[in-house]
Image: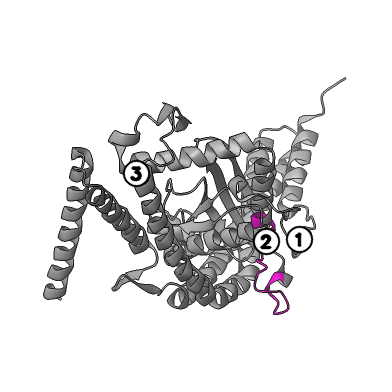
Amino acid sequence: MDAPPLGLTLRATICVSLLVAVGCSTATVRVVDLTPPQQATMEVPEELLLDVGVEVFDPNVPESFDEQREANIIPEVRRAEGNYMAFFTKNLLQSTGNWGAVRVIPRETHAVDVVVSGTIHHSDGERMIVEVTVTDARGQQWFTREYETLASKYAYEDTIPPDIDPFQSTYRRIVDEMTMYVRALTPEQIQEIRTTAEMKFARDFSPDAFSTHVVEIEPGAYEVRRLPADDDPMLDRVRKVREREYLFIDTLDEYFDGFYREMYPSYQDWRSASYGEAIAYSNQREKARRKTMAGAVAIASGLLAQRSDNVATRYGGVVGVIGGATLAMQAIEDRAEAQLHAEVLQELGTSAEAEITPHTIDLENETLRLQGSVEAQYVELRRILRRIYFEEMGLEMPDDIAEEIAAEEAAKTKESEDELFDDVST
């Protein structure tokens, strides 16, 4: 079969390029997901319920200001979202009756049996992309998934209950996948997870006494080799320490709850306002991308056509170059319009920032910011609990722990001195 003439091929290429610029539209079905997560069908014995810690989601904010603007990220709003998403996930898990205590935790801890960690890859009123990893105390990773959800504009109407998030389907899928996994575990495996968590917590506080009870068989994977007696005084003391940590985390949970309720109206307004702008921005960037590609192909094809001996082909090439240049100019205009939408999103986020981010808590006679300071306070708590453990047991503190505590105290002292110096300078 003979190949088509050069002129016909070039004309066809130019036509296809112009069609690419127009693109094809597809209807995206968006619904408000009101489906509840899987509920416990019968009462689960307490010894078979696993305690869950949901870490504050990683806000994943780029360091570069230009990258932040390119991704339409308002750093403080994104950090607030990290708290919000963790608390919403915790509430949905707790509502199922499939778990023991479910708590938001500032950072990973061995005080819980299962840890849920998340990273925000994209978040605005129209689209949310998060990556979630669930790992148990043995180091067994249950799953790592990336979830992407498109919100419906109806999710922002006043008739939608406040316990239904516009991206409810993402949270429900996370919870349901965790439920499916835990239901596949045997009672022996559940007990193994609980025991491993307790022994790892004990080893943290008293390495000399519990280092041989649980061992790291490979990076991140743990195995219980032996257990202390139920009436072991050191184990009893460790359990009391763990209860104090639970008390602290439960206290924090009240503040996360307050933060969630205080943040929700402004956050919902920001997401609702940014919904249309996010869609327009995305569509405009896609139009610009298609036109840029099509314009480049049309110009290249048109220039190639000038080498033909056929007059009609050369004429078609001229048309292709002109058409390609027109598409390129339109692409520039589309990118400029997309930037306008991006700036509107920035303004929406900045205006919400003033209402969303200022949140302090009074804890232990000290006023703390909810984000970084909560984690710092949590580290401080564990330092104090370690010291109390050894003092109450009448034991000499191991050198490595004593050095770690001394280093933390020195860092805290320096931070206080720096703050005092800044105040004096001001």
Q: In the drawing, what numbered circle is on residue 35?
A: 1
Q: What element carries label 3?
A: helix
Q: Position of residue 413 (x, y in %)?
A: 16, 60
User: On screen, 33 above or below 385?
Assistant: below
Location of residue 17 (image quadrant): top right
Q: Position of residue 76 (x, y in %)?
A: 42, 66
Q: Residue at x 74, y 54 (%)?
A: 22
Query: Which residue in the rendered view is the most extreme toward the right?
Result: 1
Q: Where is residue 195 in the image (x, y as percent from the top left)?
A: 49, 39
Question: Where does label 3 land, which residue?
Answer: 233
Is residue 425 inside the magenta stretch? no
Is residue 169 inside the magenta stretch? yes
> What's the magenta region?
155-171
* Number of residues whose C-alpha sits closer than 10 Å to that of mark 2, classed few (under 14), some (14–19) or many (20 or more): many
Q: Earlier in the sequence, mark 3 or mark 1?
A: 1
User: On screen, 53 above or below 272?
Assistant: above
Q: Which residue is drawn at 46% across and 31% down?
A: 224
Residue 342 appears in view = yes
* Discs 1, 2 touching: Cβ within 8 Å: yes
Q: What amino acid is at disc 1?
A: Thr
Question: Where does label 2 land, which residue?
Answer: 168
Q: What amino acid is at disc 3?
A: Pro
Q: Distance between the residues labelled 2 and 3?
A: 46 Å
* Discs 2, 3 touching: Cβ within 8 Å: no
Q: What amino acid is at disc 2?
A: Gln
Q: Which of 228 and 170 is in front in this view?
A: 228
Location of residue 285 (image quadrant): bottom right
Q: Nearer the viewer, residue 17 or 323?
A: 17
